[in-house]
Image (cartoon, grey):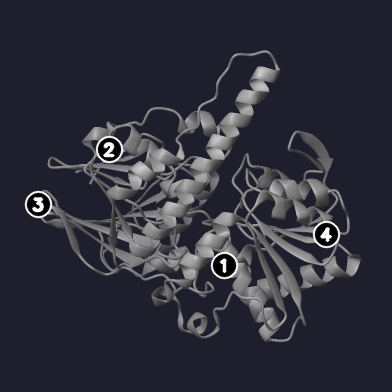
Amino acid sequence: MKIRFLGTARTVTGSCYHIVSDKMEILVDCGMYQGKDADSINKKPFDFDPEKIDYLIVTHAHLDHSGLIPKLVAEGFKGRIIATTATADLLEIMLLDSAHIQEKDAEWMTKKSFRQGKDIVYEPLYNEEDVRNALPFIDRKTYNELEELGPGISYRFLDAGHILGSGTLEIYYKGMEKRKKIVFSGDVGKNGNPIINDPQHVEEADYVVVESTYGNRLHKGLKESIDELEDAIRATFKKGGNVLIPAFAVGRTQDILYILNMFLREGRFKSLDVYVDSPLADKATKIYMSHPEFFDAEALENFRFRSSDGMHLHFTTTVEESQKLNKIKSGAIIIAGSGMCEGGRIRHHFKHNIWRPECSVIFTGFQVRGTLGRHIVDGAKTARILGEEMAIRAKVYTIGGFSAHADQKELLEWLGTFKTNPEVIIVHGEEGIELEFEKVVKERLNLITHVPHKGDEMEI
């Protein structure tokens, strides 16, 4: 059996692995590339024939792992898409939202072209109809159940502890001499993440494809990060400004809401005015609430999203509701997408707040190189936002302890539970981080390692 690395090879986004046996072809993830030149990269033809793919197995719903599914189906895929139950629910809302954004962006770029006297018509990568055509291909599965794909090939999802429904994938297959197993970590969650369970560990494998997003650093402790968030909110409100939190609609938004509720339960604040400016986050939160079977014990007892006990929580859905937030000059916590500030409503809130020194921007997740979020985190004094060059005077906080990814220590612990000395294939990290993590894995675990380039093929 062979595996080709078509995404997240010496980069963070665009997860896609192509497995070829003499009996079938399997994709693990079909993710959208994010960052510089993303549009042209995502529109390129696939590096395989979609009609020959028998199965696509999706580790979780984030678009860098799932965002090209409608394109795959539109270009001839006729197999089955396998995902956990919660991932299947999230895929529907996330892909429809992605299509809507692309249609609107294409429409805006076409109008801009015509205004400039050019006859260029921009096409979206896919539209909402493409998404609806793809949804019937999805099969819903549960954790810890061994399922057969075909003669000699079976698989199982374990809980990756990253977001609701996220999975670590085990694929069992017949090797030259014995039965073998390759494990895809998916995005490994850190221990103690709010709401969902800690990641499950695996003890046996011949090969492990492991993410390395934070493979070169350690997160701050969660308690320390929670205290830092409290201090940032207090300092901003004391100065008379607003708190802006760019956040992914799925996962990070729900974690932040949980922590803000905790502030009120513990008496740290008497009241909070919180605005979640994302129709997608509203829908995702409802899906989270519909899957308590994936919550940890603490979340089962305390997980509430409603306006009560001092939490004045507002979900804005329409553009008009979003625009009204621009009139609020102080005392508001505004959570909006996208998490890396490449799209969504956060850019509009930047336009009205980021130049104000009394305001703050709080980043709680990884910012890919080439994104607006990374530009701001790296200390830029100005940024081009919605076509206008703006001064960045708001206080910028980066709180790494809220990341839903395991850090270097936790990744090493996750790999350290294997008793079979598997070969480790390091992916899903910026090139320098992957190479640094490889060095640490060799030194501390004494395992054979690989850091593939895009398009590399490996016999397994």
Residue 216: percent from the left, percent from the top? 55, 56
Give the labeled residue for mark 1: 254
| Mark 2 vs mark 3: in front | 2
The residue closer to the viewer here, 205 or 20, is 20
Could you tell me how far apart the alpha carbons at marks 4 and 3 are, in whole angstroms?
A: 61 Å
Instruction: Please report whichever mark, 4 or 2, sits nearer to the chain's N-terminal start.
Output: 2
Instruction: Please report whichever mark, 4 or 3, sits nearer to the chain's N-terminal start.
Output: 3
Instruction: Please report whichever mark, 1 or 3, sits nearer to the chain's N-terminal start.
Output: 3
Could you tell me how far apart the alpha carbons at marks 4 and 1 are, in whole angstroms?
A: 23 Å
Splitting the image into 4 quarters, where does residue 412 fall?
Answer: bottom left
User: Measuring 64% from the left and 14% from the top, which residue is drawn there?
Assistant: 118
Q: Residues within 10 Å of mark 1 (few under 14, many from 20)?
A: many
Instruction: Please report whichever mark, 2 or 3, sits nearer to the chain's N-terminal start.
Output: 2
User: Measuring 81% from the left and 61% from the top, which residue is drawn there?
Assistant: 242
Instruction: Please report whichever mark, 4 or 1, sits nearer to the chain's N-terminal start.
Output: 1
Give the labeled residue for mark 2: 77
Relative placement, left or right, of 375 versus 78 is right
Give the labeled residue for mark 3: 151
The reply to whether residue 452 is visible in this rendering is: no
Give the labeled residue for mark 4: 328
Mark 3 secondary-structure assignment: loop
